[in-house]
Amino acid sequence: MPPNSEVTNRRSRRLQEQDAASAPASTKKLKKIRLAELSQHEVCIDGLVYDIREFGKVHPGGDQVLLFGGNDVTAQYKMIHHGHSSNPQHYLSKMALVGEVTDFSCEYKFDTPFEQEIKREVFKIVKRGREFGTPGYLLRAAFYVGLMAFAQLTWVASGSSPLRAVLLGCAGALIGLNVQHDANHGAASKRPWVNEVLGYGADMIGGSKYNWIQQHWTHHAYQAFFFLPLLSFYWLSSVFNTQVLDLNQRGSAQIMDWSNDYTKRRIPVSLLLRALYIGMNIVNPFFHHSPATALYHIWIMSTVESLFLSGLFSLSHNFEGADRYPVDHFEKTGEQVCWMKAQVSPSASEAAYQGGGSMMTYKTHLFPRMSSAYYPYIAPTVRRICEKHGVRYAWYPWIHQNFIATVTYMHNSGTGGHWELDPLSGK
């Protein structure tokens, strides 16, 4: 036997196995199913079916990928994996290819000249693999977490007060706009466990980590489907939202199916955290004050958090002058639309650099797994490329300008000014 022949044979077998795993669909015997027949362990990407049971154990972003089982995740996958177009098999070969979807269709096209140029120029500024939370972002996040812990401790231990209500409301909004936002995008850290822990910040401000991911990731992938927070009632509609009981976010149900085992296993911890939140922030004040005073303090806290958090969020999704429904062209002609252009067109604007950067909307939609700390640095480049390609966008240097435009849009929506029909005419 020649020297090292066994090593050579093992290497050869590994290469053959890798080639087989990455072989194109036409060379493998694959089952043919409809999209509705995907099992909870399967996902569809570009019409091909992949089994992700084992992949969840080695996925660089953690096992959270299993949350998407049973769905067509073409848009979500390409939204996160910006290197897919240059080396698709680097990603796809890690999953078991098991079938084809016979009724697959996608309204978006990817890897367009616009998308290629945006990626190329942005990743000159932020190197690939370095797009996660900066030391400055992590320091800021640590401060917000510390502020939240202090506000929560004094609220529980010393009793509520108007001042403590304002402090707790502001701290909760900062957690929502910064810490849990980047973490649940997988952008706070390259380490999945850091994102996992910080992502529960959504639960600590009265929301739900998994409901948020279900809603937000669907909103990002399909920008036309937008879920507007209810401003001053945001806190109330979040804390007493019954969707935490089954972790099935109804707003995205028309697109995604969340009824898989991964989701069901997260229900107990979500319910425990919700009960803890209600106990600390709603029940506890009644042990320190009369019912009227306790309700007054809770009202202050909830209103401050709602207006701070959802107010800035609404400004960042101001639709004044925007293409509200970019996939309309696909529905009328059957011609796919550029996914990245569709992200920019209905994104309202950039509010001034508020809340640590998460309000720079079309940056977080174009690069959702990039830390918000980088958005101010890539913003001029994105605007320049949009202008070059004739892609419409809205840009407000100052937050008061954005506020005026948002109020204008809301007024026109309420009076039917944006409607094709004239519902107030009585005709």
Image: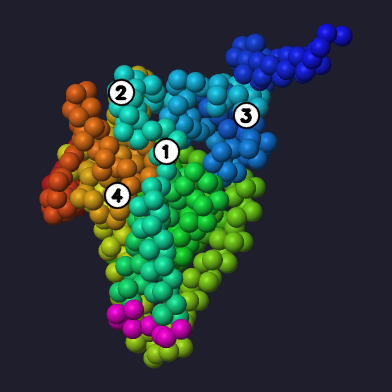
The span picked out in magenta is 157-164
- Please tell me whether mark 2 or mark 3 is closer to you in this view: 2
The type of residue carrying mark 1 is Arg
Choose the circle earlier in sequence order: 1 or 2.
2
User: Marks 3 and 2: in contact by CB < 8 Å?
Assistant: no
Q: Quadrant of the C terminus?
A: top left
Q: Mark 1 points at which residue?
A: 130
On the picture, is 392 further left or further right than 271? left
Q: Is residue 220 above or below residue 408?
A: above
Residue 139 shows which numbered tag? none
The type of residue carrying mark 4 is Gly
Residue 117 shows which numbered tag? 2
User: Marks 1 and 4: in contact by CB < 8 Å?
Assistant: no
Choose the circle earlier in sequence order: 1 or 3.
3
- Please tell me whether mark 4 or mark 1 is closer to you in this view: 1
The type of residue carrying mark 3 is Met
User: Marks 2 and 1: in contact by CB < 8 Å?
Assistant: no
Residue at the farthest right position: 1
Q: Is residue 316 magenta?
A: no
- Please tell me whether mark 1 or mark 2 is closer to you in this view: 1
Q: Mark 2 and mark 3: span between their CA atoms?
A: 29 Å
Residue 357 shows which numbered tag? 4
Instruction: Pick whichever, 285 or 410, lies toward us.
Output: 285
Q: Which residue lies at the image location 39% right of the left edge and 51% below the top edge?
A: 135
